[in-house]
Image (cartoon, rainbow, N blue to C red):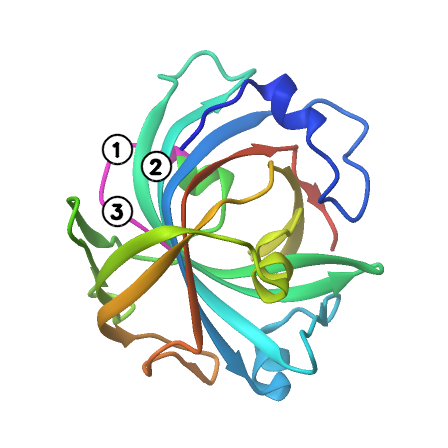
Amino acid sequence: MEVFKPEEILKSTAHRPFPMPNQDWIVLSEWSDVLMLHWKVDASTVKRILPKELSIDTFEGGAWVTICVASVENFMNRFFTIIKQGFSFDQVIMQTYVIHNGKPGLYIFNQELEKSFTKNLYKRLFKLKPGETEILRERNEEEHKFFAKNDLTGFKLGLKYKLGAEIKESALESWLSNRFRYFYEKQNNLYEYSVHHREWNFQDIKLEKFRSHFVYGGLELMHTPDFIHYSPGIQKLFWPKFLIK
């Protein structure tokens, strides 16, 4: 993954559908080895898990949900200097695609983070489900393996995959990945984060083994994904959250 300075990231805006906030960003993090598993689902299923303030966004008439696997590295808050900076952890995010006030974004309805000291801070910054998640990642030149489970929630995910050459971003990949507003609920409050990143780079991927158990509000993700893509990584800038309701 190519690493850029924040001012260089901020200059890359051609892929954004709307301007960035008129205030300073607060968090920079590097998301590496990003694997996204996508399912096309019935819009009525997504509607059941959405807060009423958010509307379903669709691609060619279909609603989508995603399990995103990523290693978050060099997580840094530019103003929070009393804690150790630059820590890392693995995470799994479950998200779907929404519109709020006419602008696209994504709604994070579940997160699973590895057991570690660092997740205690992350839990205060972002929404987390109860319990702790065991996560194991193995990487070499030939193949990648990933395993995660949370005994309290019943979540399980096992993957084995191989990577290929760099590929051009498709229309669906652009629609799924270029989201600059993140929404989540916590204690019956709905929050929004503004986000910015450069354009994604994607590689071809072959999924050799897949096993999943995830149930949430009538949504079940246990069968092979309808679409997958992989990126070696990207840097993300986050702005302060604000309360919607």
Q: Residue furthest top?
A: 81
Residue designated by label 3: 114
- Is 209 left, or right, of 27 in this rendering? left
Residue 38 vs residue 132, the one in the foreground: 38
Residue under the point 48% across and 50% down: 127
Residue designated by label 1: 117
Label 3: which secondary element: loop
Residue under the point 29% across and 68% down: 153
Work out how far the residue at label 3 is from the one at label 1, CA to CA, in angstroms.
Answer: 9 Å
Residue range (magenta) = 111-121
How crowded pointer 3 is (Cα within 10 Å; few <14, some 14-19, many 20+) is rated as some
Residue 177, horizontal then vertical, whole percent: 57, 54
Residue under the point 54% across and 44% down: 200
| Residue 103, placed above or below residue 98 | above
How crowded pointer 2 is (Cα within 10 Å; few <14, some 14-19, many 20+) is rated as few
Q: Amino acid at mark 2?
A: Asn
Q: Amino acid at mark 1?
A: Phe
Closer to viewer: mark 3 or mark 2? 3
Residue under the point 68% across and 65% down: 98
Label 1: which secondary element: loop
Residue 9 vs residue 219, the one in the foreground: 9
Label 2: which secondary element: helix
Quadrant position of residue 226: bottom left
Residue 237 vs residue 35, the one in the foreground: 35
Residue contact between numbered discs 1 and 2, judged by CB atoms under 8 Å: yes
**Residue 117 lies within the magenta run:** yes
Q: Answer with mark 3 or mark 2, whichever residue precedes in sequence.
A: 3
Residue 56, horizontal then vertical, whole percent: 70, 73
Residue designated by label 2: 120
- Is 8 left, or right, of 149 in this rendering? right
| Residue 92, placed above or below residue 62 | above
Residue 191, horizontal then vertical, whole percent: 65, 50
